[in-house]
Image (cartoon, helix red, strand yellow):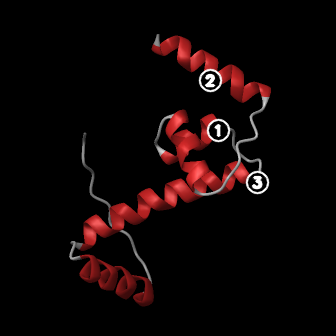
Amino acid sequence: MSVKTLSIRMDEDDYRSIVSLAKEEKEDVSKTVRELVELGRLMLAIEKYKNGEASIEKSARIAGVSISKMLDMMKEHGVTANLEEEDYLNSLKTARKAW
């Protein structure tokens, strides 16, 4: 996996919050930011699915996980999967590619 460096600007309160969280977790700030980004991707994917803005497949891509993992994560967060015919057919295509 290729690692990239990113420089961002944020307000003082957000910065202090991240530094404080990193200290509490006994982690470096970079790792804390990466964890927040990962969690943010998951929450964005779930919200887009709940709002009908994304299919399960698209939500999984946003979150960076497999469709089955996305379904598990939705269940963990109390989101019911409203499988549309398109979602079902896309899942079948994905399964066929895997076999």
Q: Residue 97, image x and y in percent?
A: 50, 13
- At horizontal 60% and vertical 49% (from top left) the residue drawn is 74
Q: Nearer the viewer, residue 75 or 86?
A: 75
Mark 2 crowdedness (10 Å alpha carbons): few <14, some 14-19, many ≥20: some
Mark 3 crowdedness (10 Å alpha carbons): few <14, some 14-19, many ≥20: few
Q: Quadrant of residue 91?
A: top right
Q: Amino acid at mark 3?
A: Asn
* Disc 1 and disc 2 in contact, CB within 8 angstroms: yes
Q: Residue 27, image x and y in percent?
A: 22, 72
Q: Secondary structure at mark 3?
A: loop
Q: How many marks on residues?
A: 3
Q: Amino acid at mark 1?
A: Ile
Give the quarter of the figure containing the N terminus: top left
- At horizontal 76% and vertical 40% (from top left) the residue drawn is 82
How far apart are labels 1 and 3 at the CA level?
12 Å
Residue under label 2: 91
Q: Earlier in the sequence, mark 2 or mark 3?
A: 3
How far apart are labels 2 and 3 at the CA level?
20 Å
How far apart are labels 1 and 2 at the CA level?
9 Å
Q: Quadrant of residue 14?
A: bottom left
**Tag shown at residue 7:** none
Say above or below: 26 vs 54: below
Say above or below: 82 vs 5: above
Look at discs 2 and 3 and give the one toward the viewer.
Answer: 2
